[in-house]
Amino acid sequence: MSGSLNPTALVRLLGSWNSGALPAYRELADVVRLLVMDGRIPLDVALPSERALAQTLGLSRTTVTAAYASLREQGFLTAGQGSRGRTCIPHRTEPASVPGLAVPEGLLDLAYASLPAAGEVVHRAFAEALTELPALLPGFGYDAVGVPALREAIAEKYTAEGVPTTPGQILVTSGAQHALNIVLRALAGKQDRVMVEHPTYPNALDAIRSAGSKPLPVALPAGTSPAWDIDAMVATMNQQRPAIAYLVPDFHNPTGRIMSDLQRRRLTRAAAASGTVLVVDETLRGLNLDGVRTAPMSSFSPAVVSIGSLSKSHWAGLRTGWIRADESLIARFIATRTVMDLGGPVVEQLAAARLVRSFAEPLDARLEELRHNRETLLGLLAEHLPLWEVERPRGGLTVWCRLPSASSTALTVLAPDFGLRLAAGPRFGVGGAFEHYLRVPYTLPPAQLEFAVGALRSAQDKLDASPHLRRTLRAERPAAVAVA
């Protein structure tokens, strides 16, 4: 048990909670709920008795009883003994507070930035893969390096992009996240620093912390020119000597920016001078909506470690990714990988080999659809949320929005009431940053985007009508949300 909260302490946390915009019991329940979700009231803590809280607040006991009943109904308070219920997280919101990607029933998901399968192309690749399977059945089925056909296809793809590559420089993984975990465990020790852009991909931050390393954030400039603060990154590498720098230079997640060739060249030189290994996430490189031409980061230095995947371009269900690196590093990655797993599924790799060889086949239609979705979302945001400042992405799958107040976590907590699941801005940063920001994907069709923006408008209206809801949240510990 985690103890109890006395009435005076709870009243201090509540602040000026009663704005009069809603019935008092509703406003009281809303603020307590936000305090629980924000971590300012810990879990498994007994709230004050109804009588004690009513006396301290100067309210009728009926009001407090109704507020507690609402919290119990929503799943934020246990039944307990009498009125001494304990704080908890409701079952229906578990996917927003614990690892996992399941979406609560009835919610439109804006925490994901993923597309459905490129249907016919993926289906055909699997059908053709099954015809190749019999030749592999006499083997054991374990392959920590990857099916040769897929490694060859990936190597040929890099070579065609101007980065000569052999199959020996490729390690096939179960997705990009698996690849990053392998790299971190092979190259970054406990307490080592890993430089990251700020904001960055939340699952990368989770992987860095899970490996026992420390994220070392370098802020992206507020404007899009320059898109990266290369001077700050170079200075950080020279002064802090991070073991690894994890970067997303191609349609950065969450901002959609793309790094120029000049910036790439400077970073690779600085990394070589400081002994920092550049680990470059290229999973979004194929989603080039504006036709921007850049060279892969590995074309500027053979020491770059590149991570790729088919999850964003073709289908996350393939669970197929890869690492491209110098053969000596690949050997280290293989040794690390074998203590984590013994290889990926064979049929998926055979299908992936065909998809990599015809990588561009589904992309023309897919990119055209994404361009239309992007324009739809940008137009809806401008119309319905004109105070939100929106950064136009050059590619990728998401729009990075600056909110008029530090209310990202509050919106995320309120969103399920309006049919949405969101990932709060602080999920993309370190130390509670980005309460002023929200990532909104344009992977959904226009009709669903219209519903989503309408729901965001309604949630924003509720915050605007109840300023105390925002004041209770100061980005101390936003609720964790699984993000894709």
Image (tube, rainbow, N blue to C red):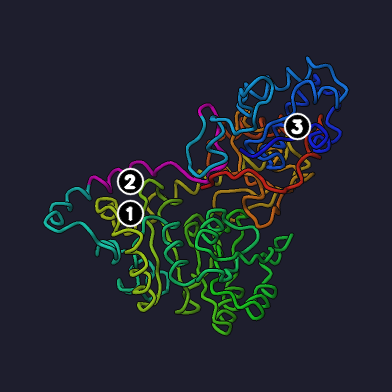
First in sequence: mark 3 or mark 1?
A: 3
Residue type at mark 2? Val
Residue identified by numbered label 3: 31
CA separation in Å, label 1 and label 2: 7 Å
Residue type at mark 3? Val
User: Which residue sits furthest bottom?
Assistant: 273
> Which secondary structure lies at badge 2?
helix
Q: Where is the N terminus found, in terms of image quarters?
A: top right
- Return the residue nearer the eye: 253 or 334: 334
Q: Is residue 467 visible?
A: no
First in sequence: mark 3 or mark 2?
A: 3
> Which secondary structure lies at badge 1?
helix
- Return the residue nearer the eye: 372 or 68: 68
Taking the spot 79% from the left edge, 44% from the top edge, the residue there is 405
For discs 3 and 1, the disc positioned in front in the rendered view: 3
- Contact? badges 1 and 2 (CB < 8 Å): yes
Report whether 36 appears left or right of 203.
right
Residue identified by numbered label 2: 122
Q: Vertically, is 307 above or below 55? A: below
**Mark 1: few, some, or many residues within 10 Å (few <14, many ≥20)?**
many
Residue identified by numbered label 1: 355
First in sequence: mark 1 or mark 2?
A: 2
Report whether 70 appears left or right of 302.
right
State the extent of the magenta-drawn residues as a range: 105-127
Report whether 156 appears left or right of 474.
left
Residue type at mark 1? Leu
- Return the residue nearer the eye: 244 or 311: 244
For discs 3 and 2, the disc positioned in front in the rendered view: 3
> Which secondary structure lies at badge 3?
helix
Question: Residue 115 at x, y = what percent?
Answer: 46, 44
Question: Residue 57 at x, y = what percent?
Answer: 86, 26
